[in-house]
Image (cartoon, rainbow, N blue to C red):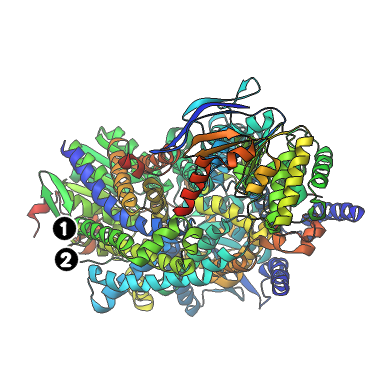
Amino acid sequence: MREKYWLWVLLVGLAIGGLLVAGCAAKGPQTVKVGVILPLTGSEAMFGAMEKNSFLMAYEELKAAGKTNIKGKEIELLFEDDQGKQDVAKAAAEKLVNQDKVVMLSGGYTSSCTKVIAGSAQSMGIPFLIVTGSADDITRSGWQWVFRGTAAPASKYTGALWDMMEKVIKPQRVALIYENTDFGTSSANAFRKACEVRGIKIVFDQAYEHGALDFKPMLANMKQTNPDVVFAVSYVMDAAMIVKQMKELDLNTNLVIGGGAGYTMPEFRENAGDASEYVTSVSLWVPNVAWPGAKEYFEKYKQKYGSEPDYHGAQAYATMYIIADVLGRAQDLTPEGIRKALKETNLTTIMGPIKFEDWEGFTNQSRPTTYVVQWLKGKLEVVWPENVASARYVFPVPRWKERG
Amino acid sequence: MALLGQTVICGLLLGGMYALIAIGMTLIMGVMKIINLAHGSLVMVGMYVTYVCYRAWGLDPYLGMLVAMPVLFLLGCVIQHFLINRLLEVESVLPENQVLLTVGISLVLTEVIRFIFKSDYRSIATPYTGEALLVGGMSISIAMAVGFVIAMVFTYLLHLFLTRTDLGRAIRATAQDREAAQYMGVDARRVTVITFGLGSALAAAGGSLLLPLFYLWPDIGHLFTAKAFIITILGGMGSTTGALLGGLTLGVAESLGATYIGMGYKDVVGLVIFLLVLLFLPHGLRSLVRR
Amino acid sequence: MEARRIVKRFGGLVAVDDLSFAVREGEIFGLIGPNGSGKTTVFNLINRFFPPTSGTIHFGDRRIDVLSPHQICALGIARTFQVVKPLRRMTVLENVMTGAFLRTGSVRRARQKALEVLDFCKLMHRKDFPAGKLTIADRKRLEIARALATEPRLLLLDETAAGLNPRETEEAMDIIRQIRELGVTIIVVEHVMKVITGICDRVMAINFGREITTGPPAAVVNHPEVIKAYLGEADA
Amino acid sequence: MHRYRIWAAVALALLALALPFIFNSPYYQHMLILILIWAALGTAWNLLGGYCGQVSFGHAAFFGLGAYSAGLLYLHLGASPWWGMALGPVVATLVSIPIGLICFRLRGPYFALAMLALGEIFRLVFLNWISFTNGPRGILMVAARPGKILFYYLALAILGLALWWSYLLIKSKFGYYFVSIREDQDAAEALGIPTTRYKLYALLPSAFLTGLVGAFYMNYVAFIEPNVVFSLGNVSVMIILVVILGGVATLWGPTVGAAMYIALGELFRAQLGAANVLAFGVLVCLVILFLPNGVVGEVDLFKRLMGGKRRGDVGGSLGSP
């Protein structure tokens, strides 16, 4: 009983003392604090870690160039883990703003966490620059404190694709499959509308829950509807499972198009193996994109952290550059001053030009540049728009059995 | 017709995999009568062991399994001996606090693995990955078929072990009536330790069979825990044949649901069957066969 | 209380086979038989822990084999369990109060009633003891006290004396007799012959779920078939 | 003794009222609100799970229904989600009736798993029924909202209601009946207790309060999606964790558990970086191993202070005076 007594005294003590300590950040030298909220544990941690690394890499480069010094004060990044949970994201946002007194917030990976952080930032009147969260309504809610530069709204990933669709692919019968997440359903909605406008028939339309072992029942069903093009919005590994099982089912179409995310990542190629060949996808970014610094970022990251970054990392890297640029230009480091500076941003990053504009009901949303990419000989090549293409597209793709 | 055939085949093969994972759980639940929410995490750890064997020594996952199983057997024994058995001995209002302990164990296992391997998605490419036989317009994945056969073999071996050996009989006796078994000289503590080890080893085997087909990251365990429960209840706690039957049923039900209702609802189909069985067949699907 | 031709089958096993008997108001009725002869099953049928396969059971002029256990208890039939079922983490007093709540919604009145019953069963000194920590004798007594608190008209006692030493057995018999003084009809299932012969008015012996004989205790205990049934058990 | 307890209660109430001014920062206030939310959820669960012994792994269903009642009112009718505070608990209670009637036929782990399955079914249906629920995109509320203080007092009122109901129930016949069902269902039935009905009597307030907290959550966080509010791992299991950490079947246990869960979770998160979940997992294992009945359940002193249970009793049960 005695030891138990001490254990609970310890626990309660920890609990009471804990909160006090948690809030009081060490008072160091004067810095300009920027809060970054990312999932560093939990099932999204892989991307959270990649984005954190990219932030730090950009920060070091900027520091070397003397750009992290804002009117005599250094920029300081404070990372907080949201565990992929929205309550925690809200707590992190409140802590950063109220306890750590950050001048602005950044981060936001999952749509749900990004929404909650954005809502908190809006009600606290603190600028929030989104890195990844792509749900449409985040920048469609009229929130003047919320800015999205490096991430496109989910429904706008397909800009370049439709150009290519009209000029090259000319689909007749499209099959649409998507994960039932915010990103998946938003993309699917936009895709459906675009098909309707162009009179393209959707012959198969189904959502699935991510993490399935076996997509064959759905794919076999799809096969019967005989589509000529498949549009699929999938998370990384689901994407690999889907194309592998298409191959196993000998499901042949003229082209499989991924709706971004999963279909462009190195892990996709690694897991799907040769089934990934010729798979096409929309993308916001590829290492060999034309924007200055993109290739260097990719190589440097790979060297430094031993793995290949994807567009999530690039988003974080570019965001860090935007932050340094904005804080450098801000008249004063009040929320209002930073908001003004954000609004006036005109910067070319490795994600392309960033300019926060109001359009089509969006606010403070940079217009995304999108690409169509294709896996060719195990490499991801830009195939559209043609003026920036790194390789010529293959269309229609060979049937599974005709491949070596 | 080909669609129905394809659906059923997919379901059966998948069900075989599910069954192997669930057999581990049914053993544990049968003997300990506890809900083990760490089961999926054990599967996950098993998969990482097999993965390491593949990366480090190029060991095929079907051989790596033979390394993963003993490792997980030990891990299971340790968990049972030092954690769960300890808790069984203390007086508590709700026996369900064991469940919470397994939640804690699951968190710890997941985070330790995340520390070592990070959250990256990992997968291995064997020569047979992505290969399939096409029979009459129906595709049969090689890795799944092999996995299915191995799962069946394991189930059969386990069945022999439980019915033919003294230790196996002791396990079954403990599952049926712990106190009675103790009167008859069974060391129930030891039996529970071995059972948990065995259950963990089988979980590792199930995970290893999935490795060539699937992929791996630290949170993969959650996918399996729920499935294993459903199957355990479908089959009746503690029954190996029941688990096999339950696994196949769940696999086919999910496949049919995915084909004819929609991929998003496939898990609902499984859960509804689960509820119905729970309510109307208290001893699981096995009781249908017995009758 | 009257049972008419009750039968209970478990799968292929017939636990109670065409048994009929009637218990008169105010008497102590004994039920004996070797292990597994179906005595406890009879109790479980009366308070409907499971339904009879066929046959009917009546209490007063009500047919009770269609009711549920708690309804039967509300009608005034209480029972104890052979394997005692104390509410382990409640105190003795709280255990008995739980029974008393059947007749009252007031905590105060339930406590009063429970204290009376505890006093009656000589458990007062254990009132604040957690039921899970009682000795076997006290647990058996607690079973009776709890059942009594529901104010039954018929009390089913299942092996109340099993596992008790001679002195404790005497005490238990005293209590049973006193309960009868209160006007409660009692059916006892018992192995200890001393209890049967000491308190019962009539006894029925059963084996394999079937009646062997019914009559005054002395006659039944010495009935050759009954002796054979017990000896048969001893042989096995 | 009695007077002492009244003073303690008054002091506690005053402290609770004053807390948001002592911790006069929105961050601490957010923590306090989360503690109140989880304390109320735990107290509600404790009625059914702790006292009545029916361990539900599906309380996320009631939480989600409450949250979605508020959210759907806003989404479809444009009504203020505050109305959801009225609708949510009613919907949750109504849904709980058939659930209870069906699942209470099952005992022990079977009941737990049936509730688990039900919770998951609700999650999947709300995720896939896009035309009605907006599916995985969830419901985002865009409106100016009142400050933290109001939310704090509202949450405090909900917790107060939960504690008050629990207190009334467990001090009455209901409490005795609930505990007897937990301790031995057969014995309870033989004592004339209609067990299914009394389990339902425990479930109804439990579901009502859980739905109320769900509706409050929608108002407070202003965004819900099925994977968040119907979550097995982050709602259903965590409610149980809160109760077991604090003390099963004790009046104050869930509140203490919630304070520990939120405060330690946040402390670890803020201080330990990526190791925070690991540390939390280790802590959970330690607490369950060494304090299997929770902090309140294990500590006599605490019990007497809080009016939980007299000394000399084991393993906290009734909380009778």
Relative to A38, B91 lies left or right: right
Residue hosting label 2: B127
Vertical arrangement, residue B54 with respect to residue A276, above or below: below
Furthest-right residue in view?
D3
> What secondary structure is found at the residue carrying circle 2?
loop
- Tell me the chain of label 2: B
Dot 2 and dot 1 residues touching (CB under 8 Å) = yes
Give the percent coordinates (x, y) of residue A361: 48, 41
Instruction: Pinpoint residue B14: horizontal percent, then vertical percent.
Output: 27, 51
Q: Residues within 10 Å of mark 2 (few under 14, many from 20)?
A: few
Disc 1 is placed on an element classified as loop
The chain letter for the residue carrying disc 1 is B
Query: Residue at the spot x=25%, y=68% of the render?
Result: B61
Determine the image quadrant of residue A23: bottom right
Give above or below for D223 relative to A284: above
Q: Are marks 2 and 1 on the same chain?
A: yes
Name the quarter where the C terminus of chain B is drawn.
top left
Circle 1: residue type: Glu
The number of discs equals: 2
Instruction: Tell me how far mark 2 sits from mark 1, CA to CA.
Output: 8 Å
Up/down of B61 relative to C89, above or below: below
Res. C70 visible in picture = yes
* Residue marked by disc 1: B131
Q: Splitting the image into 4 quarters, where does residue D205 fall?
A: top right
Nearer to the camera, A335 or D204: D204
Name the residue type under label 2: Pro
Is residue D185 found left or right of A109 in the rendered image?
right
* x and y, in percent, of residue A59 in the image: 49, 73
In the rendered image, the quadrant that contains the N terminus of chain B is top left
